[in-house]
Amino acid sequence: MSERRTQMLEAAVRVIAQDGVRGLRVEKLAAEAGVSTALIYYHFKDRAGILRAALEHVNHRAQSYTGDVESGDPRTRVEQMLLGELQDTAFVRETSVAWGELRASAAFDEDLRATLRTATEAWNSDVETLVRQADPELDAAAAAERLTALVEGLSERWHSGSLTLQRARELLAGAIARELG
């Protein structure tokens, strides 16, 4: 991906995290990225293209801090991957909030649903693989689905102030312990 396109996608994530999907205006995105609106349209064609690309970019960003769990036993790697979503860093918070905004918008945007479904299925599959390695007797697909859905819900509650980060992490760790014994 070109440096300019990455710059525009990073700006899109910031705008979505700050203003929501409804607050994403091409003019604001261009100003945030320091480019012209024409360049935005050249790279993404339309607003729907921006949203799809932003969702893919958010997923890639999340993989940078959840996908690098090479060491440890499979159970530890599941914990590291999922708890990686609940970190109090600007990068993780911005990524997580943008993901939540895009996920919520997919309920009303048919085009965004397919991209969201693909990203969610990939995440579930990664968790499922580790769960299966941790406990071959478990229904790994169902456990992965429950755990990733819980992460999303806990993240939303934490970001909205309904739950502290510490409590969200405790609840997730407890759920992982229940799922994996």
Image (cartoon, helix red, strand yellow):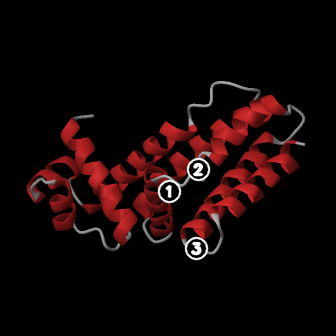
Vertical comparison of 74 with 13: above or below: above
Q: Secondary structure at mark 2?
A: loop
Position of the C terminus by quadrant? top right
Residue 175 lies, with reference to residue 105, above or below; the image says above
Identify the element where label 3 is drawn: loop
Residue drawn at x 72%, y 46% is: 144
Sort mark 2 into few (<14), some (14-19) or many (20+) by Cα contacts within 10 Å: many
For label 3, count other residues whose C-alpha is less than 10 Å away and answer few (under 14), some (14-19) or many (20+). Answer: few
Q: State which quadrant residue 102 falls in.
A: bottom left
Q: Pinpoint residue 19: horizontal percent, then vertical percent.
A: 35, 71
Q: State the image coordinates of residue 130 (x, y, percent, origin top left).
A: 72, 33
Which residue type does callout 2 highlight? Answer: Glu
Measured as percent of width and height from the top left, residue 93 is found at 48, 57
Please tell me the numbered disc located at residue 161. 3
What amino acid is found at the position of numbered circle 3 in the picture?
Gly
In the image, taking residue 141 as reference, residue 40 lies left or right, namely: left
Occupied quadrant, residue 171: bottom right
Viewer-nearest of labels 2 and 3? 3
Q: Is residue 84 visible?
A: yes
Q: Are marks 3 and 1 in contact (CB under 8 Å)?
A: no
The reply to whether discs 1 and 2 touch (Cβ–Cβ < 8 Å) is yes
Question: Circle 2 is placed at which residue position?
Answer: 85
Q: Is residue 44 left or right of residue 151?
A: left
> Of the numbered discs in the image, which one, if any, rests on residue 96?
1
